[in-house]
Amino acid sequence: MGLDTEYTETQRAIARFVESLASRYGRKYIRDLVSSGATFPHAMWNDIAQAGYLGMAIPEEFGGTAMSYDDVRVFFTEMGRHGLITLHFVSYFMDCLLVGAGNQAMKERYLPKLAAGEYWSFAITEPSAGTNSFRISTSAVREGSNYRINGQKVFITGFAESQKLVLVTKTDVKGTGPRKEAFTLFVIDRNAPGITCTPMNMGTHSPESQYIVFFEDVVVPEENRIGAEGAGLEILFNALNLERIVIAALALGLGEHVFAKGVAYAKDRVVFGEAIGSHQAVQHMLARAFVKLRLANLANREAAIAFDRGNDSRTVGMYANMAKLACTEAAFEAGDAAFQVHGGAGITDECDVAAILPMIRTLRVAPINNEMTLNYLGEKCLGLPKSY
């Protein structure tokens, strides 16, 4: 659908970079990775890092390029528009919470490596603590200047391929204090003694693996703690707003990618002597999807700009949750419309429509489901009673 008219010159440069990247890799690269069983897009990832786009949220003094969050939004929207999607991007940008919460020593030690493309994973979800993060039971018990960690995490994107892990733990294991002060974050070496993992069987067509990760008496030094003990949730809330903007951008771009296929097919496919796009049943379906995609894009733009303006966390949270909901819903509707327009052809590898839809659908439930975004908006923005 072309460059957005509101793009700044920097954002147009981002779009040109992604277009160049797609000319070297593109959907065939992603599909070949999936077919071969590969779990990480090394070549593409390295090119992105060398161009500075893995350091967008990192200050220049630590090797980053310090772009705005609205620029981050544009980058991921454009990646999606070219079908270059992997959930590795989501976990990677969650690790950038070090920018706001890490101490100076941690920033100097880790941020240059992240900006240069060192891949990290992020671990919060547990078998009995998905949406309800307060049920996290992976414990970190202080022992002098160290912590001893025990527990289990699930759906950890790219853990086996990562160098480090940002881990969410419970330090108030007895539950004697306020539950919002019970959790603490750590940076952990992927190969630390006591850590094991096993891959999960997934049904999506994307170049990453999900893992179950086990922690058995893993000793972590105090210096690897991110922020103060018990400050984990406060740190996470700010990072999760950025995560929602990234998810929204990825979903929106991917929805536009497959939607463009539907529009092109509607112009070219002739049935009973006429292009199917000339029929209102097809044309109106596509036009409605187009409107919803454009409105969702505006919502995500406002969320990113609110972040850049330094608005309070509640305002940013409102826009970020609105954007996540709007973009994932609009993307799925657009993808479904594209599939419907293709008819039986939508199932074929040649059209590359059916393979994309599971990822768009996944983004409606992960890493946060849309029902929880509605709960947030109902309670925090409308003042309705807590519903969960």
Image (cartoon, rainbow, N blue to C red):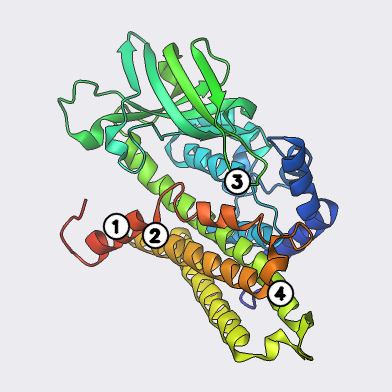
Foreground: disc 3 or disc 1: 3
Distance between mark 1 and mark 2 Cα atoms:
8 Å
Q: Which residue is mark 4?
A: 2
Residue 347 place in picture, x, y as percent: 69, 60
Q: Which residue is mark 1?
A: 376
Distance between mark 4 and mark 2 Cα atoms:
26 Å
Q: Residue at x 46, y 19 (%)?
A: 214
* Labels 1 and 2 touching (C-beta < 8 A): yes
Which numbered marker is on residue 204? 3
Residue 246 place in picture, x, y as percent: 53, 54
Q: Is residue 266 above or below residue 81?
A: below
Residue 10 place in picture, x, y as percent: 68, 64
The amino acid on which the numbered mark 2 sits, given as a three-letter code, is Asn
Give the structural element (helix, strand or loop) at label 2: helix
Which numbered marker is on residue 321? 2
* Labels 4 and 2 touching (C-beta < 8 A): no
Q: Residue at x 58, y 52 (%)?
A: 359
Q: Is residue 307 above or below residue 236?
A: below
Q: Horizontal placement of 307 versus 197: left or right?
A: left
